[in-house]
Image (cartoon, rainbow, N blue to C red):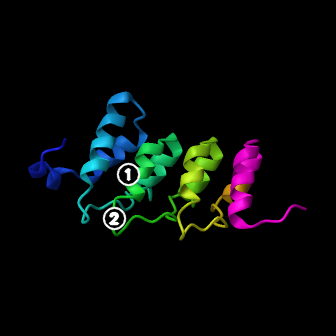
Amino acid sequence: MICPCAKPLIHRNLIFDLAEDTSKEAKILIKELNEDGLPEDLDLGTNMRGMAPLHHACRAGNVAAVELILGSGCANVDVNARCYKGLCPLAYAANRGHRKVVRRLLEEKDLDVELTDWRYHRTPIQWAAYKGHTRIVADIRNKAGYSPC
């Protein structure tokens, strides 16, 4: 259990680090943070490169960190945030084949599955198809209500 007096000291760098760390120790800490909750005024917005902790967690396939970030109640968590490449968290997860992360993101009511990146102009479903992640294509298709061709 994390000491209540330490909660104000938890800052965004810790969350950024935990987002990409899939080690057993990181999972234990994330579980404790989930139980204790994060301070609502914690800044989980983007860094200088436009990357938010949610981008890092989705890119790494870290479901526990995605859960922590989305369930944090922090005001500036944006499931549709774009990084410096124009990629949203769903695009990172779809591109890398992280199906559990994709499925968790698809539960978010504000998720926009039609966002395209700025370089290749691909949507998350197009990234998944390009990389051969057919199950993820089906998951996104079901969420978006696409009808088969």
What residue is shown at x 71% (from left), y 56% (from top)? 125
On the picture, is 89 further left or further right than 131? Answer: left
- The image shows residue 74 at horizontal and vertical percentages of 32, 64
Tell me which segment is drawn in magenta: 126-149
Q: Separation of disc 1 and disc 2 at Cα?
A: 9 Å
Instruction: Give how far across and how far down residue 29 sits, in percent.
Output: 29, 38
Can residue 11 be spotted in the picture?
yes
Question: According to the image, label 1 marks what residue?
Answer: 68
- Can you identify the residue that label 2 sits on? 73
**Earlier residue among tags 1 and 2:** 1
Q: Nearer the viewer, residue 64 or 119?
A: 64
Amino acid type at image mark 1: Leu
Q: Residue 56 shows which numbered tag?
A: none
Instruction: Please state which of residues 96 and 109 is positioned toward the viewer in this rendering.
Output: 109
Q: How many marks?
A: 2
The x, y position of residue 58, in whole percent, is 51, 48
Q: Where 42 sits versus 68, above or below?
A: below
Q: Residues within 10 Å of mark 2 (few under 14, many from 20)?
A: some
For label 1, the SS is helix
Q: Residue furthest right?
A: 149
- Which residue is pictured at 37% across the width and 51% down the height? 68
Which residue lies at the image location 47% right of the left edge and 41% below the top edge? 62
Q: Secondary structure at mark 2?
A: loop
Where residue 20 appears, as percent x and y from the top left, is 42, 40
The question of residue 134 being in magenta is answered with yes
